[in-house]
Image (cartoon, helix red, strand yellow):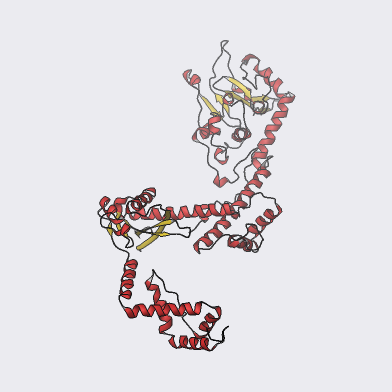
Amino acid sequence: MNIDKYIRTKNQELNVASTSAIQTNASAVEPLSGKSDGIATQEIVDEKSRSEGASCATITDAAQESVIDVQQIHVLDDVDTVVPNIADPATWPPIRNSKIIDHIINTGPLQTHCDDYPKNDTGRHFSNSHFIKKLANSETIQRRWLVYSISKDRVYCFCCRLFDSSSTSSLVSEGYNDWKHLSEMLKTHENSTSHKKFYLSWIETELRLKIGKTIDCQEQYLIKKETTRWNNVLSRLMHITLYLAENNMAFRGNSDKLYTPNNGKFLGLVQLLAKFDPVMQEHLRLAMKGDIADHYCGKDIQNELIELMGKKVKSEIISRAKKSKYYSIIADCTPDISHVEQLSLTIRFVDISSNDDKISVKEHFVEFLPVNQSTGEKLTEVIIDILNKHGLELNDCRGQGYDNGANMKGKNVGVQRRIQDINPLAVYVPCGCHSYNLVLCDAAKSSVKSVTLFGVLQRLFTLFSASVHRWKILTDSLGLYTLKKLSDTRWEARISSVKAVRYQISAIHDALITGLRRPGRNGKGF
């Protein structure tokens, strides 16, 4: 099971700064929506101007060498809905967070130039010449800060409207449209102290955004670094969990604290890894010092990781079974150590999920489920519920395999009959191991010599296992095999008991003689 693909471990470098939380990897940046992108690249024509035959085009600051590539700027997905038209300052929201301000500055002041501006009641209108300031020495300077709103037919100061939320100037608040006195108004405004202040703030922020040195740039870098560290820590903890689960090992010990005796295999592997891995070494150092509140090594996170991995494995099994379509079920019930009847369900199918041409038959355990009743009706309901929960159609079942209990194999009310009543194609095949065990059991009990043989084997085991000293005498005499306790349910396991006597009968004889000659508490052997 490869879990690396579920861990996000991107190493990103800062290349675009922001006055708020921003993405710092240009390769991972998503482009803005077509709506905002179109503002910087397409014509924007107002319905009012269009009806009057006006033709207006939105262009970026002429001082820039090219149109700003807004696709290199990452902003929130909802910025485009908050600012529907960046080229029109009248549509900017009255309350602008740092993300919106960054986006507007990165996009730049988009100055709208029209061939024929709308006229007011006196016949006056805005002119493109106002975008240019003429100095006393006849030099010209572009007014970068001046922007025209098509929707309002007014002009605004780009920087003051962006940063000065308390200004009462019409160039900042509702826009200025007194075209007769516009020239005087522009001169007065651009020489004002407040305008110079916010103009410098705009230029400074613009430069910082370009070189990646805004106020929270370092903070964002630290957040990114911390995120990467936690991803690396979680990846290692998941691999430790996977290793213990694959090898069926217990996770916890008598203690749940790091660097304490008998704290279990999970914490032991974490401590072992920290000796060689700098990531875990730093993580445990921070945890032991108390610099981090959560170290993700406790029992709760262990249980969560086990549960998540179990769900992933089960999901993969069910996915492969569905891809194969047809399957068989194998079910059995047994009481656990707490005397609760547990139903185990296994599915068997032809695995065709591999990319190569190899096709193999797979058996996968699905889950345990406690049952209150072991009747055929109740067990049938439980099995069908499990199949439905995982999306497996009972009509696709082609086989059933159970033990020889009456509640399972009963031809009238057993589980196999009830399922065949629903799906006649689900053929019942008795479990071979259970059947062979019953045959061996009945065959052995039918012979007096067989019963006597296994009785002697059990008495030999009881004799030597009753004392540590006797067992020591036996093991010193035996070689490859040792005496085994007889199993009442698994007769095939009795072959081990027979082998021990069959191939080492002389050694067992010697052990018995040694035990008889060895003086005991009453002066006799054994």
Is residue 351 visible in this depiction of the protein? Answer: no
228 and 56: which one is in front?
228
Q: Nearer the viewer, residue 78 or 271?
A: 271
Question: In the rendered image of this protein, does residue 291 appear above or below residue 360?
Answer: above
Residue 147 vs 304, above or below: the answer is above
Query: Does residue 511 appear to the left or right of 219 in the view shown?
Result: left
Quadrant in the picture for residue 93: top right
Q: Is residue 501 left or right of residue 78?
A: left
Q: Can you see residue 361?
A: yes
Give above or below for 372 relative to 82. Answer: below
x, y percent for residue 121: 56, 10
Q: Residue at x 53, y 52 (%)?
A: 304
| Residue 466: x %, y % from top left | 51, 77
Q: Residue furthest front?
A: 522
14 vs 394, left or right, is right
At which x and y percent is residue 450? Answer: 34, 79
Q: Residue at x 67, y 36 (%)?
A: 205
Number of disc labels: 0
Image quadrant where residue 427 sits: bottom left
Residue at image position (50%, 20%) is: 49
| Image spot of residue 223 (x, y percent) | 64, 46
Task: Depth check: give the residue in front, 25 or 144.
Answer: 25
